[in-house]
Image (tube, rainbow, N blue to C red):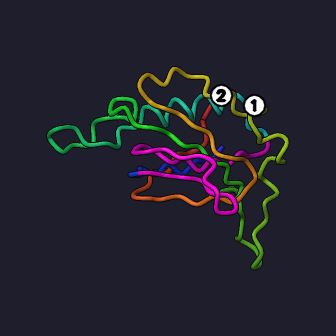
Amino acid sequence: MRAVVQRVAEAQVRIGGEVVAQIGAGLAVLLGVGRGDGEADALYLAEKTLQLRVFPDPGGEMNLSVSDVGGAVLAVSQFTLYGDARRGRRPSYIEAARPEQARPPAILPPYPVDPSNAFIRGGPWGLPAARDLQSLQLLPKRVA
């Protein structure tokens, strides 16, 4: 599982010009599911995302999580995170999970962790998305 976590002032997902999911300040998560990823990987990544200290405390230090600041999380599928362009000019997505395997609840039960103060919303899976982005953090795949 691969995720790009981006701190946002707001984020929304539009399909055909219609807003289908949106949040205020918080985190936008672009989530790529790979072959062999399972519920344990989803749980690890959800917990890690909710606990990332990427928001400033009153002293200006990055010490607060999205839960601490009462922010929101918007998760959107992004199979292209598994694109491999090391050979040739056309990326291979062979390592990405098949759509039916990557779609909730097959891989990501409705956020299996207690998000405390975080408001969590899922975006559509397998459809184009648009987001407002401010900064980014990369999370590695879970190591057993």
128 w.r.t. 111: above or below: below
71 left or right of 94 in image = left
Task: Give above or below for 16 relative to 8.
Answer: below
**Front residue of 112 and 9:** 9
User: Gap in Å between the C-alphas at discs 1 and 2?
Assistant: 7 Å
* Residue marked by disc 2: 110
Assess whether residue 3 is covered by the magenta stretch: no
Extreme-left residue of the structure: 59
Kindly identify which residue carries mark 1: 105
Give yes or no for contact between labels 1 and 2 (Cβ–Cβ under 8 Å).
yes
Q: Residue at x 48, y 25 (%)?
A: 115
What residue is at 42 percent from the left and 43 percent from the top? 26
Secondary structure of residue under mark 1: loop
| Magenta stretch contains residue 19 | yes
- The residue type indicated by label 2 comes to Pro
Image location of residue 61, percent across then percent down: 21, 43
Q: Point out the tag, 1 or 2, that comes first from the N-terminus.
A: 1
For the point 27% across and 37% down, the residue is 63
Residue 118, position in %: x, y? Answer: 44, 30
Q: Which contiguous range is marked in magenta? A: 10-35
The C terminus: image quadrant: top right
Residue 130 at x, y = what percent?
58, 60
